[in-house]
Image (spheres, rainbow, N blue to C red):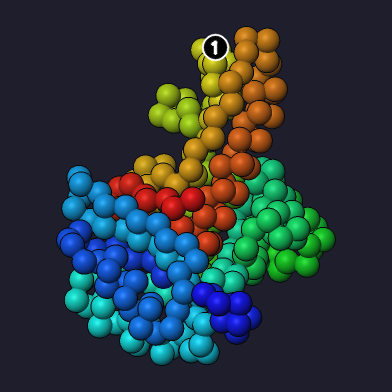
Amino acid sequence: MTPDQAAAQTDDYVLTLSCPDKPGIVHAVSSFLFMTGCNIVDSQQFGDRDTGLFFMRVHFSAVEPVTLEKLRASFAAVGDTFQMDWRLHPAGEKMRVLLLVSKFGHCLNDLLFRTRIGALPVEIAAVVSNHTDFAELSASYGIPFHHIPVTADTKAEAEARLLRVVEDEEVELVVLARYMQVISDDLCKRLSGRIINIHHSFLPSFKGARPYHQAHARGVKVIGATAHYVTAELDEGPIIEQEVERVGHELTPQQLVAVGRDVECQALARAVKWHSERRVLLNGSRTVVFA
């Protein structure tokens, strides 16, 4: 690309796709981009021999002015030829995110701060909680706060209210930032591939209350956290990212909790960043992450 062409470059896009693996996919994609006057900035691909699927993420620039609608319409023929599940979005588009929290606010605070300083390419549409503890924190960032209480009798109504917030705010991603409510099967299906959770990686060894205290009693040597997509199977969804930290015998249960908070924040922030940059593709019960 010449300097003059670089100067004329105005629009960047990200194309993601998955399809049955067979020869010619990369050639077809690159040929399409060449024929439409686009320049590839970055390209990653992976062929899974176990599932027989091919995955690809391409960041490209349109040297000549072109609309997103025209690109999508013209790429449809390529997608149909290879039976692709594909998405095409502007690279600079900030994903609208809804944060859910209960009474532990470390992940919420971390995501709010990272977003404010530009470390996360997202727009936080609102915060939803079944408690009011973090209404002031949300307000300090100028983020709308919705208090939606949940009881056994009102769970269906609460989820209906939550879904209305998702729809009204045009939310693309829901993040359970230590939201301590089980999501119903119906809501999991409605938000499939669009809802991320964080939990400690002791599961399934230390289920239930006070997992870090249970871990301390067993003398664990590694603290961990897992960020994953939410499915109907509790804490069994496709894993996006994991973080670990070695710990020693001298740490108290309270110190283990503090270490756990840090690794939870790190794992969740990376998962949100990668998803919002459209680097995560679902591969059955697993994920392909082009980080």
Mark 1, Cα crowd under 10 Å, few <14 / some 14-19 / many 20+, is some
Q: In the rendered image of this protein, does residue 255 appear above or below residue 275?
A: above
Which residue is at a point 61% across and 18% down the rendered structure image? 247
Residue tagged 1: 219
Which residue is at a point 22% across and 78% down the rendered structure image? 80
Tell me if residue 187 can be seen: no
Q: How many marks?
A: 1
Q: In the rendered image of this protein, does residue 55 appear above or below residue 235?
A: below
Residue 190, x across and y down, in percent = 38, 66
Left or right relative to 65: residue 51: left
Residue 258, x across and y down, in percent = 69, 29
Observer-nearest of 200 and 113: 113
Q: In the rendered image of this protein, does residue 64 appear above or below residue 25?
A: below
Residue 39, x across and y down, in percent = 46, 74
Q: In the rendered image of this protein, does residue 82 appear above or below residue 102?
A: below
Observer-nearest of 249 and 30: 30
Which residue is at a point 47% across and 62% down the rendered structure image? 42
Left or right relative to 148: residue 290: left
Residue 30, x across and y down, in percent = 34, 71
Instruction: Please name the amino acid that badge 1 sits on.
Output: Gly
Which residue is at a point 52% across and 55% down the rendered structure image? 274
Q: Quadrant of residue 244?
A: top right
Left or right relative to 143: residue 46: left
